[in-house]
Amino acid sequence: MGRRVGVITEPSQMENVARELADMEVLLDTTELYIGDYIWGNYTIIVLPPSFPMGGMENPLLTFASPTIIVGDYSQVYVATHEMAHSWTGNTITCQNWESFWLNEGFTVFIERKVSGYLNGKDFALVEAQLGNTSLWGDIQAVGLDNTYASVHPILNGDNPDNSFTEVPYEKGFQILFYLEQMIGEGPFRQFLRYYVQKNFLTSITYIELQRTWGQWVEENYEPKEANAILAATEWNTWIFKPDLWVPGQLDFSTPEGQDAEELAMAYIALNGTASPPNYADYFSFYSNLKVIFYETLSAH
């Protein structure tokens, strides 16, 4: 598929897989441009039979993927981007235990959405984040606000880690990094992420190493008064241990196109099934995630 990317699948599916994943090399190059050198050689995705139980599973050099990502409209290619990003946060740096699983997944979702934003526009990535926030809140409510599984630091007490598996490490982990980026700016935060990868290169870590790396980088790059203000505003304990959404109003994922999808749904609701709104045809211009926002708005009301 390119100078260092390829796919493996059953012969009967090869044409569809190759067409759907035609931009693999662009995805890998863009991810590398953002986060730093890709160290694992050739990157290959093996698209497995339908019995494979996960959307994707990262391994150095060879990502396992479900055939459900091959849908014909490129809407599930983000799975490939996500597994590529794990080459840095998951394989180059790995969580030391399941309580720190968000270090694999939250960082990877953040990088995945940066790549989406570069290739499809920032609003595209914000729409992904908006949908992620909806899924996050649903999972937090499902496990309960009194349950550590609603935090990014689940206390397992011998429980099977699969029982704590939700969108929380993915989406709340992403939101932690989104918040930090808002605090210092996109350029400086990208510098921090590259520093983080190099500082913890080929090691297994917990949130303690993340906190230490963040503190070191801030102190090295800001004057003492500003550094103290940034460190005070970070509020690690709240982000990591609180089983809840934290000040979601500070995290604005709204976009004009997302609002259009919500407003069209509300127009249908207002008509109570008696007619379609005059701009009903706008729906046909929505890409897949905007359609999801439309349907989620309908179902929520």
Image: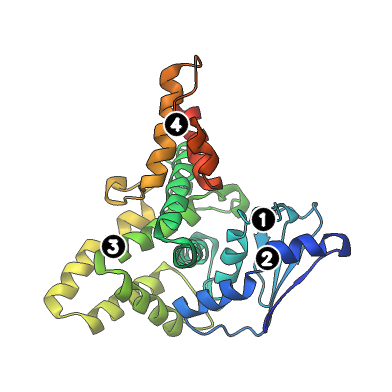
First-in-chain label (3 vs 4): 3
Quote the CA–CA distance across marks 2 and 3: 32 Å
Q: CA distance from mark 3 to mark 1?
A: 30 Å
Residue 55 disc label: 1
Q: Tell which circle, 2 or 1, labels the residue nearer the N-terminal end.
A: 2
Q: Amino acid at mark 1?
A: Gly
Helix, strand or loop at label 4? It is loop
Q: Earlier in the sequence, mark 2 or mark 3?
A: 2
Counting other residues with Cα less than 10 Å from the Cα at mark 2, is it few (<14), some (14-19), or many (20 or more)? Answer: many
Q: Earlier in the sequence, mark 3 or mark 1?
A: 1
> Visible in this render: residue 256?
yes
The relative height of residue 38 versus residue 293 in the rendered view (above or below) is below
Look at mark 3 in the image and give the residue it sits on. 182
Q: Nearer the viewer, mark 2 or mark 4?
A: 4
Mark 2 vs mark 1, foreground winner is 2
> In x, y percent, where is residue 254?
35, 47
The mark tally for this picture is 4
Judging by the rendered image, the residue that carries numbered circle 2 is 21
What's under tag 3, amino acid-wise?
A: Gln
**Residue 183 x %, y %:** 25, 64
Q: Quadrant of the C terminus?
A: top left
**Residue type at numbered disc 2:** Leu
Q: Residues within 10 Å of mark 3 (few under 14, many from 20)?
A: few
Residue 244 picture quarter:
top left
User: Which numbered circle lies on residue 279?
Assistant: 4
